[in-house]
Amino acid sequence: MSSTYRGRIAPTPTGYLHLGHARTFWIAMERAREAGGRLLYRDEDLDPQRCKAEYTNSAIEDLRWFGCDWHEGPDVGGSHGPYKQSERHDRFLNAWKLLKQAGFIYPCDKSRKDVARAGLAPHPEDETAEQIFPENWRPPIGTGKAAATPGETNWRFRVPDYLKIEFDDVRLGPCAFTCCHDFGDFLVWRKDGVPAYELAVVVDDAAMGITEVVRGEDLLISTARQLLIYKALGLQPPEFYHTPLLCDVSGQRLAKRHRSLSLRELRESGQSPEALRQSDDWWSGLED
Ligand code: GLU
């Protein structure tokens, strides 16, 4: 069967992967397999402060142990290595130029901390929700258009005032987020010269011909932001399938700092991937 389905798994190498990552990537792999399509591995190693080669290697090793496999990536010793975002800077810079010339983005010297201090929490009850960039901090339209390089400042995407972004998630169905209400002007380039996640992921998913993005529900709101970038760059967005997040026994969602459920520890403690895939943890939150 030939298929045009193209999926990807795209970990950020800032720590050991945990069972939640493995479950998301397993679902991504199953969806590609069921569609008779292809899956590629992309190492999202853009942040030189936080990403480490050691974690790139452990992620690949642990996922292979777990039984994950993918079809594409540069050849490394006879198997498929990852595409590395750190080697694709020119593409991101090109997108920055296009967005800047068309007036979608502007230079901004406000840091995340400044935005947090401004205290415009979209959902005050949710402590993890990102703060909204205050509208009255925006510079006039056209600011930054003449810049030849991003320079040593942050760049933000100017979100359309109160536009409702709607999309159909393959698993969750209709989703909607409103600009300036659920999220505000967001980073596309950082002052330390690193392209921000939202920009890099769109550029790469489009360049790699991804037809369906499978990732955790924590990135649902990012999808709304990314749809704005797709539109601004005139690119066709993929489908989105957001997976439920795994929680620990106390109901907290797993993070890389939770060592107990890291694949590495599970493996070292003698657990088998097959048993983990049968466990209650694995099945929690999955509908079928
Ligand atoms: N690299 C991101 C992460 O590990 C995921 C990116 C994505 O799937 O869009 O959280």
Image (tube, rainbow, N blue to C red):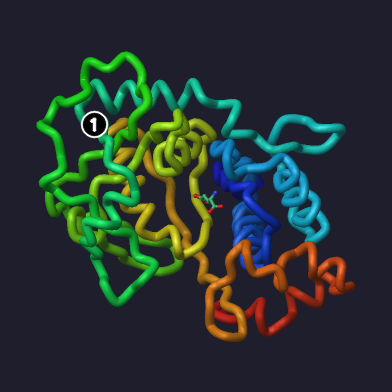
Label 1 Cα crowd, 10 Å radius (few <14 / some 14-19 / many 20+): many
Q: Residue at x 87, y 67 (%)?
A: 268
In the depicted view, which residue is nearer to us: 218 or 38?
Answer: 218
At a point 27% along the width and 25% down the height, the residue shown is 100
Percent of width and height locating residue 81: 74, 37
Residue positioned 45% across, 43% down in the render: 197
Vertical arrangement, residue 153 with respect to residue 101, above or below: below
The relative height of residue 81 versus residue 114 in the rendered view (above or below) is above
Where is residue 58? Give x, y as percent: 77, 50
Residue 118, how many percent across, how many down? 21, 56
Secondary structure under badge 1? strand
Q: Name the quadrant of the C terminus.
A: bottom right
Residue 287 visible, this orientation? no
Determine which quarter of the picture holds residue 192: top left
The location of residue 37, given as percent across then percent down, is: 62, 47
Q: Is residue 219 left or right of residue 132?
A: right
Kindly identify the amino acid type of the residue bearing the numbered disc 1. Tyr
**Residue marked by disc 1:** 106
Name the quadrant containing residue 155: top left
Q: Is residue 204 visible?
A: yes
Tell me if residue 58 comes above or below residue 247 in the rendering: above
Q: Is residue 192 left or right of residue 146?
A: right
Which residue: 58% across, 66% down?
A: 255
Q: Is mark 1 within 8 Å of ligand 1?
A: no
Query: Left or right of 228: which side holds 244?
Result: right
